[in-house]
Image (cartoon, rainbow, N blue to C red):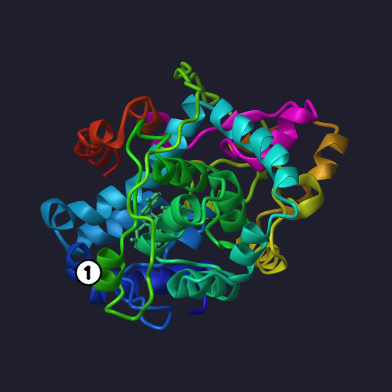
Amino acid sequence: MNFGTSRASAIERLNKFVDQNLFEYSKLRNFDYGPNNRSNISCLSPYITHGIISELEVIKKSLNKFSFSKNEKFIQEVLWRVYWKGWLELRPNVWTDYLNELKKIRKEFENNSNFKNALKGNTEIECFNEWVNELKENNYLHNHARMWFASIWIFTLELPWQLGAEFFMKHLYDGDSAANTLGWRWVAGIQTLGKNYLANEWNIKKFTNNRFNNIKLIENAPPKISGKSYSALKLEFDNPQNFEDRNLLIFENNLSFENTDFNNQKFQKIILISNKNENRSIKLDEKVLKFKSQLIEDQKKRLEEKSINCEIMDISNIKNLKEKFYGLYPTVGENLDYINSNNIKIDFIYRKLDQFSWQYCNKGFFNFKNYIPKIITTFS
Ligand SMILES: Cc1cc2nc3c(=O)[nH]c(=O)nc-3n(C[C@H](O)[C@H](O)[C@H](O)COP(=O)(O)OP(=O)(O)OC[C@H]3O[C@@H](n4cnc5c(N)ncnc54)[C@H](O)[C@@H]3O)c2cc1C
């Protein structure tokens, strides 16, 4: 499994998937055939997470090939990301509370041998051990494996979901504050209240083509209880009517300026922000940091080819910028935390897709799904 670090490699993957595999996506997507056979899914998440390609670009490409009804499942999956993002924007304290709980739990589990063995892939459960190694080596796991992994972590190994979510964030190329935190909460049973996801031997065997033996799991356990409830904020975000001549900051979630709603806008300079581990609450694996920095370099190269003035800057240097500037909104997560905790004033610009879709994220995904045709027609 190899993820190239350029927009060109993302586009190539998208085209190949749509041409050759999209037609069977809804039938085969739940199968995890192993790291050497991933053609049944798109493996686009490391690129979409970083904005190297956008959700709309992926959806448009798929609709050029098949009608909406033939394509509905894939489009729904692509828009899950937008939904999770919006859900977390409406309840940013879920993220803040997660990081605070994590700090405390890290200390409690510092010397816990179950935890240490899980991180090493040294448990009694063969498939789990294999996924640990795959995560560390390939920095990617199939969606079904993520669900099984999280379920085994929480209900069989009886470890806190917060530590599992940190382990994923550390190693995934597509690590995303919303999809990851809420994915783990969902498995634990605190996202959809009272409904946990329990992995079972039969399901794992079937969807891994019987690749694993010795799957002894706890298949019955009550959902976890968080004891916290979060009401949705009212989101207000206005993009400027007339842009002033200023610099634009771009964070790691929007690394394809040419492809944004603002690509016709003239900015003095585009500043691509990188964020090293010292300013992150969750320290990322070196390979993940390298992946990010190569994607940033690729964006810089593409901008320079278009003669757009640009530079790469560490997040800690933003506070030294003298003039006013705009920033493409980084969404709830590590970059926004840094900006807020350092009282940095940025006039944020929001993607039109997010502005439109996030209003439908206050309830569950089944409700959001009803608005997907409206979202598609608005942006097609
Ligand atoms: C515990 C857990 C943690 C997860 N952590 C992350 C994470 O950190 N980052 C991340 O991007 N996804 C996360 N996911 C969601 C999902 O597993 C991945 O997006 C998906 O496996 C990516 O593979 P793909 O690109 O081949 O997906 P495909 O099946 O080809 O789907 C196409 C696109 O749809 C989007 N998508 C599909 N399923 C989901 C989903 N459940 N949530 C959000 N977007 C989705 C992705 O952008 C994906 O690239 C998590 C899921 C679980 C259960």
- Lateral position of residue 335 relative to residue 219, left or right: right
Q: Secondary structure at mark 1?
A: helix
Q: Is residue 353 magenta?
A: yes
Left or right, 373 with respect to 57, comes to: left
Vertical relation: 175 (above or below) 106: below
Q: Is residue 338 above or below residue 25?
A: above
Left or right of 154 in this view: 311:
right
* Residue at 44% across, 46% down: 183
**Viewer-proximal residue among 89 and 116:** 116
Which residue was labeled with disc 1? 28
Q: Nearer the viewer, residue 137 or 254?
A: 137
Q: Quadrant of residue 193?
A: top left
**Which quadrant is home to the C terminus?**
top left
Crowding around mark 1 (Cα neighbors within 10 Å: few <14, some 14 to 19, many 20+) is some
- Taking depth in this image into account, of 5 and 380 the one nearest to the observer is 5
Percent x, y of residue 204: 31, 67
What is the magenta range? 330-356
Q: Can you name the residue that lies furthest to the bottom here?
A: 36
- Residue 348 in percent (x, y) is at 61, 30
| Residue drawn at (46%, 16%) of the image | 234
Estimate the x, y position of residue 310 in percent, counting from the top left: 72, 54
Q: Residue at x 43, y 59 (%)?
A: 146
Q: Amino acid at mark 1?
A: Leu
Q: Quadrant of residue 83?
A: top left
The picture quadrant where one finds residue 368 is top left
Q: Position of residue 338 (x, y in %)?
A: 74, 36
Label 1 near ligand 1 (CB < 8 Å) = no
Q: Is residue 246 visible?
A: no
Taking the image as four quarters, which one is ligand 1 found in? Answer: bottom left
Q: Is residue 178 magenta?
A: no
